[in-house]
Amino acid sequence: MQIKKYVKKNGEVKIYEYDNKKYNKKFYEKHKEKLCGESIQCECGGRYKHINKSHHFKTQRHKKFLSNVINNAESLHEEVEVETESDGKETEESVKSEDR
Ligand SMILES: [Zn+2]
């Protein structure tokens, strides 16, 4: 707990105890509905509450989803590489015909 001094505009000095825990509890009570009320549908198929957002992003389910997204992006990249490979085959064939 901290003792805080607050000087009002009229010069009156107020000394009060500042309890961080109490303040957090007040804040929590005030935003309780927003923090705990509605659960949000996540891209991974799971659901999380606003207060658990950062916690949810660390769950195995969400991490698995994220790694799947990365894998999908990589497989798309592979498809592009396959196309360039077929171009290489065409040049190989033209080289062969020159040999004849
Ligand atoms: Zn998720």
Image (cartoon, grey):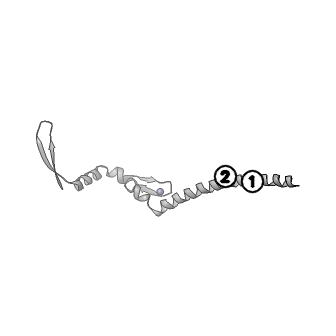
Q: Which residue is mark 1?
A: 88
Which residue is located at x 86 percent, y 55 percent? 99
Image coordinates of residue 18 in percent, x first then y, are 19, 52
Question: Toward the viewer: 47 or 89?
Answer: 89
Question: Toward the viewer: 58 or 74?
Answer: 74
The reply to whether callout 1 and callout 2 are in contact (CB within 8 Å) is no
Question: Is the residue 6 above or below the residue 95 in the image?
Answer: above
Image coordinates of residue 1 in percent, x first then y, are 18, 56
User: Is 8 left or right of 75, judged from the image as shown?
Assistant: left
User: Is 83 left or right of 49, judged from the image as shown?
Assistant: right
For label 1, the crowd category at 10 Å Cα-Cα, with few meaning under 14, some 14 to 19 and many 20 or more, is: few
The Cα–Cα distance between marks 1 and 2, rounded to whole angstroms, is 13 Å
- State whether label 1 is within 8 Å of ligand 1: no
Quarter occupied by the C terminus: bottom right
- Image mark for residue 46: none
Question: Which is in the foreground here, disc 1 or disc 2?
Answer: 1
Q: Residue reaching furthest front? A: 99
For label 2, the crowd category at 10 Å Cα-Cα, with few meaning under 14, some 14 to 19 and many 20 or more, is: few
Which residue is located at x 77 percent, y 55 percent? 89
Question: Toward the viewer: 70 or 91?
Answer: 91
Q: Quadrant of residue 56?
A: bottom left
Q: Which secondary structure lies at badge 2?
A: helix
Q: Which residue is mark 2?
A: 80
Residue type, mark 2 in image = Val
Image coordinates of residue 25 in percent, x first then y, are 26, 54
Which residue is located at x 51 percent, y 57 percent? 66
Residue type, mark 1 in image = Gly
Image coordinates of residue 51 in percent, x first then y, are 37, 55
Q: Which callout, 1 or 2, points at the residue further toward the start of the chain?
A: 2
Q: Residue reaching furthest bottom? A: 60
